[in-house]
Amino acid sequence: MENPLFEPKFLNIEFFFNQVLKFLQDAYDTLLHISGGIHFFQYLKIALSVLSIIFITIIIYSVVRLLEIRKIEREKYHFAEPVPKDGGEKRERWEIVEEHVHSERPADWRIAIIEADTILEEMVKKMGYEGESLGERLKVVEPSDFTSIQSAWEAHKVRNQIAHEGSGFELTHREAKRIIGLYEQVFREFEYI
């Protein structure tokens, strides 16, 4: 037969609460008895206040010192913009995309999106992703390796609509700028432009 002591049917929370309360009261009474009364707590309060002031002073000093060190680091180490290895060709291509998207002609907006998609395809191919098309390459990308993958997909889908529907696809200037912004977000993640 099993021991019912180890298989309770209910849990008496009030009992445990009362036991903890009784323990704390006993500890308080014992501390009062040992310390000689209420004066001990006044001294403890003063001591803890002094310690608090000391620790706050240390924290303030540490923060000020850390800010000074960061200022010295910024002055000592100037971080330059990375220079593309291809002599700026990527940047020039991106500037052409931007010129097209800022044009007043809808045909130029379409060209900007198609050109940006071509740049994206080259980038993904250079990153080593396998596939026949950009869509297939984007499918094998791990989201943890490519945080802007959703932006790449959304922009690529619009490019596909332009390629398949041609002038039948309704594209506003605002939408074209938004799509180019998605491409730019992807390129900036990998410092491609």
Image (cartoon, grey):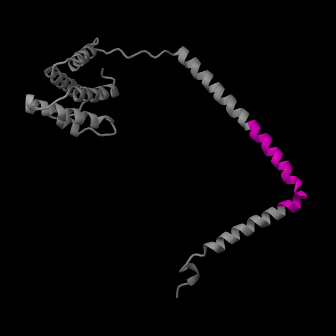
Between 180 and 90, the residue placed more toward the observer is: 180
- The image quadrant of residue 128 is top left
Where residue 84 sits in the image (x, y, percent)? Answer: 32, 15
Image quarter in which the C terminus is found = top left
Queried whether the magenta region covers residue 28, the answer comes back as no
Where residue 168 sits in the image (x, y, percent)? Answer: 8, 31
Between 41 and 122, the residue placed more toward the observer is: 41
Residue sitting farthest toward the top? 87
Q: Label the magenta part by its dominant secondary structure.
A: helix
Where residue 147 sits in the image (x, y, percent)? Answer: 33, 36
Residue sitting farthest toward the right? 36
Between 75 and 115, the residue placed more toward the observer is: 115
Say left or right for 47 vs 191.
Answer: right
Q: Which residues are magenta?
A: 31-54
- The image quadrant of residue 70 is top right
Say left or right for 49 vs 87.
Answer: right
Q: Is residue 39 above or below residue 76?
A: below
Say left or right for 164 vs 62.
Answer: left
Asked whether the viewer can see residue 124, the reply is no
Where residue 144 sits in the image (x, y, percent)? Answer: 34, 39
Q: Residue at x 72, y 67 (%)?
A: 21
Q: Residue at x 33, y 25 (%)?
A: 188
Asked whether the viewer can see residue 56, the reply is yes
Count the marks: how many?
0
